[in-house]
Image: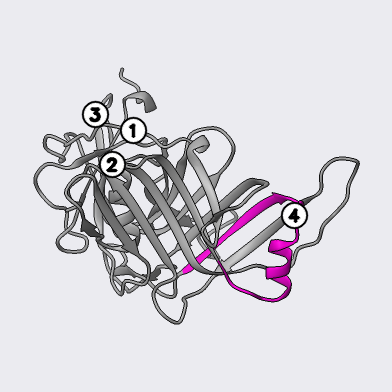
Amino acid sequence: MARAYGANAQLLGKFEAVYGTTPVGNFIKFPFVSSELGSEQGLIASNLLGQGRDPAQPMRDVIKVEGNIVAPVDVRNFGHWLKALLGPPDTTGAGPYVHTYISGASSLPSLSLEVGMPDIPAFFTNMGVRLNSMQLSFARSGAADATLNCIAQGETKAAVSGGGVPTVAALTRFNQFQGSVKKDGVQLGNVTGAQLTYSNNLERIETIRSDGKIDGADPTIAALTGTIDVRFADTALIDAATNNTPVELEFGYIIDANRSLIFTAHEVYLPKPKLPISGPGGIQANFNWQAAKPDVGQMLTVTLTNDVEDYV
């Protein structure tokens, strides 16, 4: 009897022309670290009385299709996830290509994602997938990964893959040692760790339907938040926090001039943190920042430079 192994699992995806309608043709094969995306349906305990002490059978609850996908932050495939999170990019150049994504789109594209386990075989297609949020962490070492929170409309199971002949892009990962954090265009020193989270704050449209599905997942007010952990060596960030002076923060991964990924939060507000002294070692300051939309422009700009001509 065959058993499913993560080593043989696959994640295929394609953008939908109509929300919740799985497209035909060849899907994209996405590299991934882990996936919790799938449907679940809980049970509601019986509330009947007069049938003795043993309970009657439970009732089925609504179907929820959601979960996190952890994906590598790479040069080529990551552009598809950014498109799902922020909308299609504005692409310029003739190789290398510069893809510019901006926050604030009124509508977002949806995907069909197939989580396949060929050992069984069983292939679970999640349709109407929208990205609720993306979280990235910056550290001194290790691989760069992103946690993608997904909300889908429904899921179907099949014995064969519906992804056709998947297209596969050469994988070139960004690593944490290629990361940088800048304040107002200048490298920020003494940073020991950082994190940013962009959320679309999707609202599930939970209408009454016989199939238990949602009607959609619509974006509401977006949020861009994060943390910066620094060794206390100067008062530049403390002064900005004390005076409520907004700053521009840039988080990036750069391999060379032709391969880079830059997240720019244009107007960031810093809270004034405590500076606890817990021993003879260095003193650390932790800033939980929040971004806002400036008077002109957008809250977030993401620039991906690579050799991919477009993201369809």
Q: Is residue 60 visible?
A: no
Q: Which residues are magenta?
A: 223-247
Q: Which residue is mark 4?
A: 285
- Sequence-wise, the earlier of marks 3 and 2 is 2
Categorize mark 2 by other alpha carbons within 10 Å: few (<14), some (14-19), many (20+).
some
Residue 226 pos. (x, y %): 57, 59
- Sequence-wise, the earlier of marks 2 and 4 is 2
Q: Which residue is mark 3?
A: 121
The answer to whether the residues at label 1 and label 2 have Cβ atoms under 8 Å apart is: yes
The answer to whether the residues at label 1 and label 3 have Cβ atoms under 8 Å apart is: no
Residue 40 pos. (x, y %): 40, 50
Residue at the (69%, 62%) spot, across then down: 237
Q: Secondary structure at mark 2?
A: loop
Categorize mark 1 by other alpha carbons within 10 Å: few (<14), some (14-19), many (20+).
some
Please give the label number shown on residue 117.
none
The alpha-carbon separation of the residues under discs 4 and 3 comes to 51 Å
Amino acid on which disc 2 is placed: Arg
- Sequence-wise, the earlier of marks 1 and 3 is 3
Which of pointers 3 and 2 indicates the residue nearer the eye? 2
Amino acid on which disc 1 is placed: Thr
Q: Which residue is mark 2?
A: 76
Residue at the (28%, 50%) spot, across then down: 80
Q: Secondary structure at mark 4?
A: strand
